[in-house]
Image: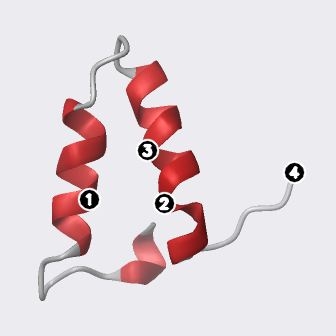
Amino acid sequence: MRVRPETAADYAAVARVHVRAFGDRADEAVIVALLRQRASYTPGLS
């Protein structure tokens, strides 16, 4: 397994994982997408 920071190209796949992980609900994926838009977002933590 290779662990690396996410890139914009990964966002859709990460969102699909969040949806499946949280009971086929998009809430978590939406929250993560919104967090990425914040000025205080730290990409290295994703």
Q: Which residue is mark 4?
A: 1
Q: CA distance from mark 2 to mark 3?
A: 6 Å
42, 7: nearer the viewer? 7
Whichever of callouts 1 and 2 sits on the residue coming sooner in the sequence is: 2
Q: CA distance from mark 4 to mark 2?
A: 19 Å
Q: Residues within 10 Å of mark 2 (few under 14, many from 20)?
A: some
Q: Secondary structure at mark 1?
A: helix
Q: Disc 2 vs disc 3: Cβ atoms closer than 8 Å? A: yes
Q: Which residue is mark 1?
A: 33
Tag 1: residue type? Ala
Q: Which residue is mark 3?
A: 15
Q: Which residue is mark 2?
A: 11
**Residue at x 51%, y 75% (from the top left corner):** 8
Q: Disc 3 vs disc 1: Cβ atoms closer than 8 Å? A: yes
Q: Residues within 10 Å of mark 4 (few under 14, many from 20)?
A: few
Whichever of callouts 4 and 3 sits on the residue coming sooner in the sequence is: 4
Tag 2: residue type? Tyr
**Residue at x 57%, y 48% (from the top left corner):** 13
Does 19 sit left or right of 29 as displayed?
Answer: right
Q: Disc 1 vs disc 2: Cβ atoms closer than 8 Å? A: yes
Whichever of callouts 4 and 1 sits on the residue coming sooner in the sequence is: 4
Q: CA distance from mark 4 to mark 1?
A: 25 Å
Q: CA distance from mark 4 to mark 3?
A: 19 Å
Residue 27 image position (x, y, % from top left): 19, 32
Tag 3: residue type? Ala
- Residue 7 appears in which quarter of the rendering? bottom right
Q: Closer to the camera: disc 4 or disc 2?
A: 2
Residue 22 image position (x, y, % from top left): 35, 20
